Image: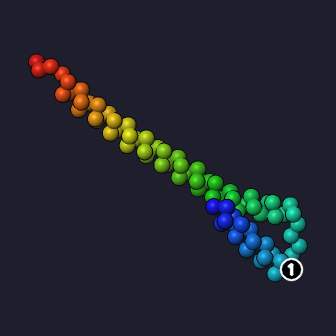
Amino acid sequence: MLLMVWVGAIVVTVNAKLLGGNVSFFQNICLLGYCVAPMIAATAVCMFIRLTVSDVVNLTLSTCGSTMLRREDRPPE
């Protein structure tokens, strides 16, 4: 991920220099923030979805498993 940020920052900085713009240190810092923000947002969404889906699957499997085991432990009526 860090490599993608560096490459993105280099591409945008070189593009600005080729177009004749002056890029200062603080503009580069802002540029890195703009490069990182979409990846952080996408990662947060993916983590939320993955945790939610895996939690539901784990809960369902553990509930079914424990119910089946308890059925076998009950004495016959």
Q: Observer-nearest residue: 42 or 62?
A: 62
Q: Observer-nearest residue: 65 or 43?
A: 65
- Residue that appears at 63% across and 58% down: 39
Quadrant housing the N terminus: bottom right
Amino acid tagged 1: Gly
Q: Position of residue 29 (x, y in %)?
A: 81, 60
Q: Is residue 7 above or below residue 65?
A: below
Task: Assign a secondary structure to mark 1.
Answer: loop
Q: Give the quarter of the image for residue 28.
A: bottom right
- Residue that appears at 73% across and 61% down: 34
Q: Is residue 72 above or below residue 45?
A: above
Q: Is residue 45 above or below residue 18?
A: above
User: Which residue in the structure is indicated by mark 1?
Assistant: 20
Q: Position of residue 42 (x, y in %)?
A: 58, 56
Q: Position of residue 49 (x, y in %)?
A: 49, 49
Q: Position of residue 75 (x, y in %)?
A: 15, 19
Q: Is residue 14 above or below residue 35?
A: below
- Residue that appears at 86% across and 70% down: 23
